[in-house]
Structures are given as structure tokens and as C-alpha cells.
Image (cartoon, helix red, strand yellow):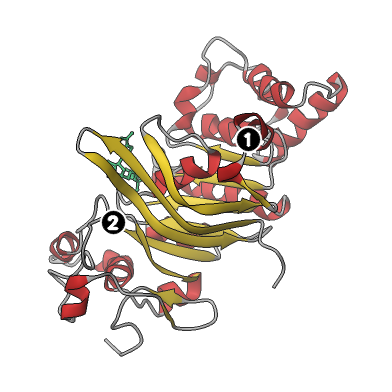
Amino acid sequence: MSAALLEVSDLSVGYRSAGGMQLAVDGVSFRVDRGGSLGLVGESGCGKTTIGMALMRLLASNAEIVSGQIRFEGQDLAALSDVQMRQIRWRRISMIFQAAMNALNPVHRVRDQIAEAIVVHEPNLSRHAVEHRIHSLFELVRIPQARLQDYPHQFSGGMRQRVIIAMALACNPSLIIADEPTTALDVIVQDQILKAIGTFQREMNLGMIFISHDLAVVADVCTHIGVMHAGRMVEMGLREEVLGCPGHPYTKMLVGALLTLSDAPADLSDSARAFSVNGPVSPDGCPQRVICPDATDACRREVAEWTELSATHRVRCRNAGKGS
Ligand SMILES: Nc1ncnc2c1ncn2[C@@H]1O[C@H](COP(=O)(O)OP(=O)(O)OP(=O)(O)O)[C@@H](O)[C@H]1O
């Protein structure tokens, strides 16, 4: 197997508070290859954004990488100095934040904001090269060149989000982290942006981590899916494996909701709520232990180790692969 673009091993991240350190991410491992796309899916509070921020080394001041390794292009990011990390952040790894379109500066033309994003990180680039890069980026995110001189308020929400995507791609990164990039948009624009993201990811052969609470969205753009629950990764596999043969009860609920959504079953919200045992990492046992019909004493004591369902599909559940 060739070297991964990104390899995260046993990553744990905690937040300090008056009550002590509370883990938000517990022992998470995954890899992303050049040109590969991994969707991280799970409910609000399960630790997805914390992982993204840890990869960017932009964690809140009360947060700490408690353990684990983040190997990116052969370097351990967790061990780099701030100066070394500044050479990587935005240039080699870039991130699109939730509702970032509102972060554009209203008094500057979009062209100038993209130019600044390029020049800050690549000050030696000629004016001609910067201009060329801006034009290629606009082409990539499908914004007409004629709009370059416009101000953000002259753009629709979807177009502003495209500008943000262009800025995230400004320095030709090899890995992009997209954190709920379409959540603030209506469904039609969301679909257009997802298509644009899929296109540039393939055209630029980028590695991508796509964070969302919505399995349908993740399944739309990613070849691999990692399901997170209460700070832990509970299932990881190819999209077809996770959707077609989910092994963890939480994934089964997500997939079930996806498949039956069009039928709008009366009990959907109840079953979803029943499995919504999320939030920070619980110190003992599987978070599903109270509601899982197959929970054993061992599940009540501690979270299961990984079970391999295939070379590419693994699940953290004692009952995985035993039939449902
Ligand atoms: N600065 C902070 N201080 C203390 N706890 C925090 C801080 N930021 C996040 N947390 C906690 O860490 C856990 C994980 O949060 P995180 O934002 O990573 O989850 P998420 O899955 O990305 O959710 P969302 O989709 O709502 O952003 C949550 O319990 C959250 O309350």
C-alpha cells in the first residue's frame, strides 16, 4: 500500500474546564490518500470539528492533543513548531469552515480578497502569476470572470460560498477539510456546491475530509465514510460498504433513516432520538449500551475493539457480522 497523504493514529483531544479535562475525541484513527475523500459523519457534538481543528493546529486555547499522531506528507503535525506549522496551514492543508461565506470582508472586492489569500502565503509570486491563479480558481468554482470586481454583497449565498472555496484552494493545497460547507445554503444551491466540490477534488487530485452530520451529503461526495459517535470512530469503510452493510447500531440507524426518509415513517424521529446518545466521551461502556437490544455485560463495561468486516470495512461493535 502506498504512503497515505494523511494518517491519523489514535488521536485523542480534550478540553480543559473547571471540572478537569474532558475528552472530545478518543482514540480516532483514519487515513486519507492523495485524491481520496473521507466523510466524517455523526451528530452535533461528537467531535468532528475538533478533529478538523486539530489537523489544522487551530484548536481552542483550552484544548489539547492528549495523545496520538497526525502524519501528513511524512511529517508529524502534532510535533511541529508553530513556525513550521505556518508553512503547512492554508498552503498544504486548507479548511472551509461552517457558514464561512459570512466571513468575507464586505468592503473589499472578492478579487482582492482572493489575491490577498495568495500573496500572504506566496509573497514571491509575480503579479502575472497571481492574476492567472485567480482566473483559474474562478473557473474551477464556476464563477464568471466578469464578477471578479464585485463586492461580496453583490453575490448570492451560494456564490459567496464558492468564493470561500476558491480562497481555500488559493495556495494549491494537497488536503482540504470541508466542515459542513453547505449547511447554511438552500437545498438546490447545496447540491450545486457539492457538485463543485466533487469536481475540484477530482480535478486537483486533492485529499479531502468532508465533515457533516448528514449521511446523505457525505455519501454524495466521498468514497470512504467514517461514522463518529460520542467522540469515537465506530465504523469506517468504503461508501458502498457502510451504506450497503452497516455494522454498528448507530450506523444502521443513520442508514435506515436515509433509506426510509422518503416514506416519512411516523416513528423515524423516535428511533433517531433513541439512538441519539451522543456528546462527549463517556468513560465507561459503549454509549449504545442502554438502548441496544443486543448489548452484553461486556458492552456495559467497555467499548468494543474493532472487528474487521473486510479489508476496508471495520466496526467497533461486538455484534458486528453476527447478522441483525
Ligand atoms: N472550546 C471548547 N471548550 C470546551 N468544550 C468544547 C469546546 N469546543 C467544543 N467542545 C466540546 O467538544 C465536543 C465536540 O465538539 P465538536 O464541535 O468537535 O463536535 P461536532 O461533531 O463538530 O459538532 P458540530 O457539528 O455541532 O460542530 C462537544 O461536547 C463540545 O461541547
Name which residue type carries label 1: Met
Tell me if 102 is positioned left or right of 135 in this view: left
For image coordinates 19% across by 38% down, the residue present is 19
Query: Contact (CB < 8 A) between labels 2 and 1?
Result: no
Quadrant where the N terminus lies?
bottom right
Judge from the rendering whether residue 117 lies leftward or rightward of residue 292; answer left or right. right
Crowd class of label 1 (few under 14; some 14 to 19; many from 20; radius 10 Å): some
Q: Position of residue 315 (x, y in %)?
A: 39, 75
User: Reading the chain from its start, which is encountered first: label 2 or label 1?
Assistant: 1
Cα–Cα gap, marks 2 and 1: 29 Å
Q: Who is closer to the viewer here, 195 or 27?
A: 27
Between circles 2 and 1, the one closer to the viewer is 1
Please tell me whether residue 54 is drawn above or below residue 242 in the rendered image. Answer: above
Please identify the quadrant where the C terminus is shown: bottom left
In the image, residue 216 lies at what x, y percent? 40, 60
Label 1 belongs to which residue? Answer: 85
Q: Secondary structure at mark 2?
A: loop
Q: Is mark 2 within 8 Å of ligand 1?
A: no
Query: Which kind of residue does numbered mark 2 sit on?
Result: Ala
| Residue 263 in picture, x, y percent from top left | 24, 68
Looking at this view, name the residue that lies furthest to the bottom.
Answer: 322
Q: Residues within 10 Å of mark 2 (few under 14, many from 20)?
A: many
Q: Which residue is mark 2?
A: 230
Q: Quadrant of ligand 1?
A: top left
- What residue lies at 60% left-to-right and 30% top-to-bottom? 82
Q: Is residue 276 visible?
A: yes
Q: Is residue 295 visible?
A: no
At 47% from the left and 62% from the top, the residue drawn is 219
**To which quarter of the image does residue 130 belong?**
top right
